[in-house]
Structure formats: structure tokens, C-alpha cells
Amino acid sequence: MKTGDIQQTLIQNLRDAGCEPALIRCFLQCRERGETEYLLQLLDRHRRELLDVLHREQRRIDCLDYLVYQIKKEGRPPR
């Protein structure tokens, strides 16, 4: 695989992972400078941000599930 192809694959992977253009630019610059440890830190930080969003949304889903459960249990909406 050519260098340009590898870079395009990396960019697409970062986009697919929800990375903003600024993060992608930073990632590519650090990669060019060989700053592997910092690259890993960038990816880890983004991963933690995604997990935070996931957990927040899961709590919201849990709240809705509980409300549905209560409505079905009582046969009418709670007051």
C-alpha cells in the first residue's frame, strides 16, 4: 500500500470514529513527527469521550425503559 493510500485510510478511519477535522490534522502532524506516545494519548482521549457519551445516552435509555415498565405495570401513566 502506498503512503498516500495509508494516509487516506487513516483519515477515513478517524472520520468513521467521529474525530473532528482539528483532531485529524493534529493526529497526522504528530504521526509525521513520529510522536507515537502522543498519538496514543489522542486516541485514548477521544475513546473516553465517546464512552462518556455512550454512558450518558444509556442512562437516558434506562430512564425511558423504567417509564415504559411503570406504565405497563400500572396499566396507566404515572401521576
Image (tube, rainbow, N blue to C red):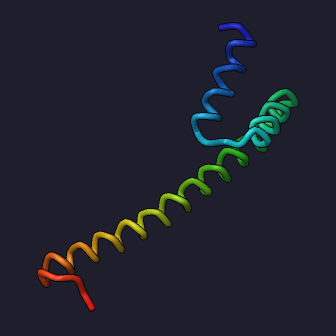
Residue 27 placement, left or right of 59: right
Q: Position of residue 21 (x, y in %)?
A: 75, 38
Q: Quadrant of residue 29?
A: top right
User: Of all residues shown, which one is farthest toward the top?
Assistant: 2
Q: Quadrant of the C terminus?
A: bottom left
* Image point (68%, 13%), residue name: 5
Image quarter of residue 17: top right
- Rendering quarter of residue 18: top right
Residue visible at 24% across and 72% down in the picture: 68
Viewed as shown, does residue 23 lie left or right of 76?
right
Against 38, residue 76 (above or below) is: below
In front of the other: 58 or 38 = 58
Q: Quadrant of the N terminus?
A: top right
Does residue 77 sit above or below 4 in this rendering?
below
Query: Would you place residue 22 above or below residue 76 in this image?
Result: above
Residue 1 or 62: which is nearer the viewer? 62
Q: Measured from the top left, where is residue 39 in percent x and y?
A: 74, 40
Q: Does residue 60 sit above or below 28 in this rendering?
A: below
Q: Work out whether residue 15 or residue 71 is closer to the camera in this orientation and state it.
A: 71
